[in-house]
Image (cartoon, grey):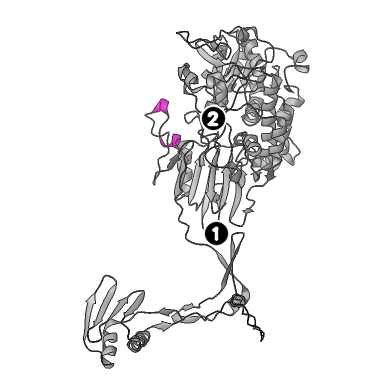
Amino acid sequence: YCLSGHPTLPCNVLKFKSTTIMLDCGLDTTSVLNFLPLPLVHSPRLSKLPGWVSKDGTINLEKELKECAGRVFVDSQPEFCLPERELLDLSTIDVILISNYHCMMALPYITEHTGFTGTVYATEPTLQIGRLLMEELVNFMERVPKAQSATCWKNKEMQRMLPGPLKDAVDVWTWKRCYSMQEVNSALSKVQLVGYSQKVELFGAVQISPLSSGYSLGSSNWIIQSHHEKVSYVSGSSLLTTHPQPMDQSSLKNSDVLILTGLTQMPTANPDGMLGEFCSNLAMTIRAGGNVLVPCYSSGVIYDLLECLYQFIESANLGTTPFYFISPVANSSLEFSQIFAEWLCHNKQSKVYLPEPPFPHAELIQTNKLKHYPSIHGDFSSEFRQPCVVFTGHPSLRFGDVVHFMELWGKSSLNTIIFTEPDFSYLDALAPYQPLAMKCVYCPIDTRLNFHQVSKLLKEVQPLHVVCPEQYTQPPVTQSHRSDLMLELQPPPMPYRRCSVLNLPFRRRYERVYILPELANSLVPSEIKPGISLATVSAVLHSKDNKHTLQSVPKPPPVPPSKKRKRVIEEPPVMLAPKPLLSGAVPLEAFLATLQKHGITEVKVEETADGHILHLQAEDTLIQLEEDGTHIVCDNNEPLRTKLRDLVLRFLQKL
């Protein structure tokens, strides 16, 4: 079941061998681009924006919609597009598997308001950094409370009349405001930590196991397998050498089904090239006396940006330029990255034993080149000096400290904003700030797998079937001629979209059954062909927690002699000795000769698709000889039937 239409922020549910497993619960934050930014300090510009009235003046939503540079925005607390909640009953979900901290942001909506009673599995860095990102989001929203909540524009009739992107926004009625810290804590209390390659049994039916996916600290792909089937879930993986542990590819082999999602959002941009461009644009702006604003998440790519800058600062003579990292969770994020040693790539792990901090940002902080603050209020405002570089959130430019810097620096063409996060279209992000004088540079850094890498990976691991979002089965709309920017596989992948339900091509043929030692002991194999022995088993099948066991048949207890007539019901069921199994074939010529010996001479033989029919004309009897059975049809002549049966049995082996 696909509950999210965003391939990089997935939410799918897999029903497999009587378990219901949710794979990720990504929160589609692109919906916030339809809202006005939340300024930390009162913004005269935003408060003076005109309300929107339709051209013919029939619709007046001045209170809810504001117009800026030809685009219309909702003036209300930003809302998120949640995973679909009506497609299946979410209270039936047994477990939720999280692949990385960007794909768990909808967790509180799922665990707190649907009757969910299961367990969430994630690695430790995913849980801790995911907690930071949620905390930061809640903080951004609660710092700037909005008095009113706009709802009229969501009316279907109204929405149809609205301009631009608002008219085409999907499922606006299901959009929700941000959760509270209390809900975050309650949701995360349901998380159980797992390590790479650790095997966890679910109800005895399936076993799940996370594998390193190489994309971010603690990011995982998941293997879900039973004794005879295997599903791999590959989401947000990277083969590039960055700070996390490298991707484990070999464990994905022999999958019946591979669910593939979270590929790069920038298939044409090379991350190394983008890093180079990032550094050179930053240096150019600083040399010209301008400031650089980098809207980013508080964890992830920022570690690589800081590392890249660390090597670049000295060579570019930026030694005196201050770098500021502003986020409610800045301090925790920088510290966490240093303590998750076992989740880092090998050369960073080895530094921990030196002892050296694995990331160079520790040194930037010690030498006062990088300073971090929880927000623009307090210490920051007194220590702030320009020109500088500021890393802050949120990448959508709708909330967080970045809104203040946009208002502060947007009017000067000396300043530059550099977009590195690929999640939002930078033109849409900038729309409510237009007209804008500051320079904009777009260097999206997305280290996730591209189509070329995926094709190579799938050739190596060779799953029988691939399931993926429909976006991956056709080239991007903007580059419809690029057939290399899509998945071309044999057999073709099974595509899904939001709200689709796919039947996976599993042929579940086998189940594992255990046999008790005393029962095994009583078996007597008999050889039926050289090297092949068979034994028949009569047993009671006992099934519990998806484990099946063959146990000995209990012997009926002896009935004590009793004067009173017992009620019939109480007698134990009589265990009949099982009939012997027959094997072999009845050869036609030899059988006819035997019949003749026993005085049956008038036999008409008819060939059928499955064998032969013998018509004994004097006795008015039919014998059907087939590969897997022999039927004797005679009317009310029991002695004849028994005689024929015994003749047939002469040719067969008994087990």
Q: Secondary structure at mark 1?
A: loop
Residue in the picture at 57% in, 71% down: 540
State whether residue 565 is above or below residue 43. Answer: below
Q: Quadrant of residue 592?
A: bottom left
Task: Provide residue 544's location: percent of width, then percent of height.
Answer: 61, 62
Relative to residue 374, is residue 570 drawn left or right? left
Residue 271 — which label? Answer: 2
Instruction: Judge left or right: residue 607 versus residue 468.
Output: left
The residue type indicated by label 2 comes to Pro
Local packing at callout 2 (Cα closer than 10 Å; few below 14, some 14-19, many 20+) is some
- Determine if the magenta segment contains residue 472: yes
Q: Tell me if residue 307 can be seen.
A: yes
Quarter of the image for residue 346 reads: top right
582 to the left or right of 199: left
* Mark 1 crowdedness (10 Å alpha carbons): few <14, some 14-19, many ≥20: few
Left or right: 558, with 504 as reference point = right
Is residue 356 inside the magenta stretch? Answer: no
Foreground tag (2 vs 1): 1
- Measured in 3D between alpha carbons, the distance from the residue under mark 2 to the one under mark 1, in whole angstroms, is 40 Å
- Looking at the rendering, the stretch of residues picked out in magenta corresponds to 470-482
Q: Nearer the viewer, residue 331 or 620?
A: 620
Q: Is residue 613 above or below residue 425?
A: below
Residue 142: % across, % down: 70, 23
Q: Earlier in the sequence, mark 2 or mark 1?
A: 1
Residue type beneath disc 1: His
Q: Secondary structure at mark 2?
A: helix
- Residue 253 vs 362, above or below: the answer is below
Residue plotted at (73% across, 20% down): 375
* Residue marked by disc 1: 227
Residue 40 pos. (x, y %): 69, 15
Residue 97, percent across and down? 61, 44
